[in-house]
């Protein structure tokens, strides 16, 4: 995820923190130091960091369970609203999605249980102290379980509900039902946040949940339209590529007036990454036109074979947040596929009375 800094690696998975995450400890530390002094502020910041340590373990639960089903995880990124584990693809089978979704909250249950057992040794008096650091951390993990298990996308509970429904109805139908439940819950949360708790953050969170549920349903409903289609049927065969050792000024002079937004980057005849037009323009506006393309390109974009099913590629692009991917045939770069191309094809397909590729209604 752009705008993130690498913290380290756990089980081969890179852990990153987004710049916006820093707002949270700064805000909490700043408000606490004004009201309770520097020591209380330091403890508050440490507590926030401890909670997000639990969040990282939560995401590792998802990632390591997905790994058991042959699904890799690109990275884990910490945001102010929580953590995000970017899987290479979503599980194909309902029971696999159930296992991956439940694994995260299960980690928080284990953390809470360990803290409970540890606190019991100090007596009931400490357990009843709401200001105790470990007591608060235990209850926070319990709250994380309750929150994440709400039956609404993108929370784990929404995926659990979808996976259970998908065991008895179609995946698309299960998603639509789960999305409706999630949107209904989001409306309830928004009303409660506005009229009961007077909490604007709860209202904003409800809005995010509502849009996420709608987006998930829209995306999954496009899957039947992608069935049986190969990447090579939609890929863009004419495109501009860049050299890793050319400067941004040189690259911009060749690409500024093209309709293309993402450019494969070549070094000694091999594909080494992708460069986006917004990245080039942003760097040039900051006076960095003399920097090389290879310094700013994105390196983690996968190369897709032209015979790969479009549905699987679309899923990988969506989960990995790739706006485009390079397409290869026999190891050679032959095309480019963009999210916009897939979206336009889906819209055209849905509007066509006599659907192509042998699909029924």
Image (tube, helix red, strand yellow):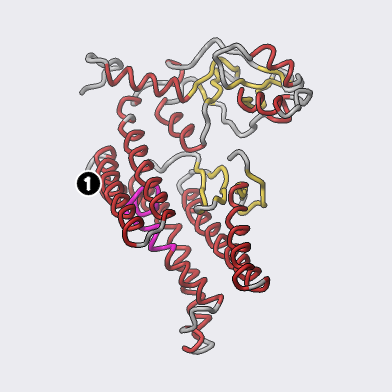
**Measured along the vertical axis of the image, is residue 21 above or below residue 50?**
above
Whether 361 is drawn above or below 48: the answer is above
Query: How many residues crowd mark 1 within 10 Å: few (<14), some (14–19), many (20+)?
Result: few
Quick check: is 53 in the magenta stretch? no
In this rendering, position of residue 19 left or right of residue 340: right
Tell me the residue at 50%/53% (across/down): 81
Per the image, label 1 sits on a secondary structure element best described as: loop
Looking at the picture, tell me which residue is in the foreground, 276 or 240: 276
User: 38 left or right of 334?
Assistant: right
- Residue 151 painted magenta: yes
Q: Tell whether 54 sits left or right of 225.
A: right
Q: Return the x and y of residue 166 as percentages of the image width and height.
A: 27, 45
Q: Which residue in the protein does label 1 denote?
A: 168
Q: Which residues are magenta?
A: 144-158
Quadrant of the image containing the C terminus: top left
Query: Which quadrant is the N terminus positioned in?
Result: top right
Please identify the quarter of the rendering in which residue 208 is found.
top left
- Measured as percent of width and height from the top left, residue 194 is found at 35, 55
């Amino acid at each position: 995820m752009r705008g993130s800094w690498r913290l380290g690696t756990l089980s081969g998975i890179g852990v990153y923190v987004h710049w916006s995450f820093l707002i949270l400890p700064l805000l909490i530390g700043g408000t606490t130091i004004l009201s309770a002094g520097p020591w209380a502020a330091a403890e508050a910041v440490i507590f926030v960091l401890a909670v997000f340590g639990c969040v990282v373990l939560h995401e590792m639960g998802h990632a390591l369970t997905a790994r058991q089903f042959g699904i890799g995880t690109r990275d884990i990124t910490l945001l102010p609203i929580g953590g995000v584990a970017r899987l290479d693809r979503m599980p194909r089978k309902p029971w696999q999605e159930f296992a991956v979704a439940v694994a995260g909250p299960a980690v928080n249950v284990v953390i809470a249980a360990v803290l409970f057992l540890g606190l019991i040794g100090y007596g009931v008096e400490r357990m009843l102290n709401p200001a105790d650091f470990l007591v608060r951390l235990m209850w926070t993990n319990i709250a994380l379980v309750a929150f994440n298990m709400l039956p609404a996308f993108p929370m784990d509970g929404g995926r659990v509900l979808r996976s259970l429904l998908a065991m008895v109805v179609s995946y698309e139908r299960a998603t639509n039902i789960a999305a409706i439940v999630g949107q209904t819950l989001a409306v309830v949360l928004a009303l409660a946040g506005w009229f009961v708790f007077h909490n604007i953050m709860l209202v904003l969170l409800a809005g995010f949940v509502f849009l996420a549920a709608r987006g998930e349903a829209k995306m999954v409903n496009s899957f039947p339209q992608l069935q049986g289609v190969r990447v090579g049927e939609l890929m863009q065969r004419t495109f501009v590529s860049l050299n890793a050792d050319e400067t941004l000024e040189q690259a911009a002079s060749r690409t500024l007036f093209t309709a293309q937004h993402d450019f494969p980057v070549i070094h000694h005849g091999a594909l080494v990454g992708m460069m986006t037009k917004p990245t080039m323009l942003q760097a040039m506006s900051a006076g960095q036109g003399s920097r090389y393309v290879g310094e700013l390109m994105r390196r983690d974009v996968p190369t897709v074979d032209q015979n790969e099913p479009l549905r699987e590629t679309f899923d990988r692009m969506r989960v990995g947040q790739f706006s485009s991917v390079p397409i290869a045939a026999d190891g050679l770069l032959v095309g480019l596929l963009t999210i916009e191309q897939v979206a336009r094809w889906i819209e055209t397909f849905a509007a066509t009375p006599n659907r192509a590729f042998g699909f029924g209604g």
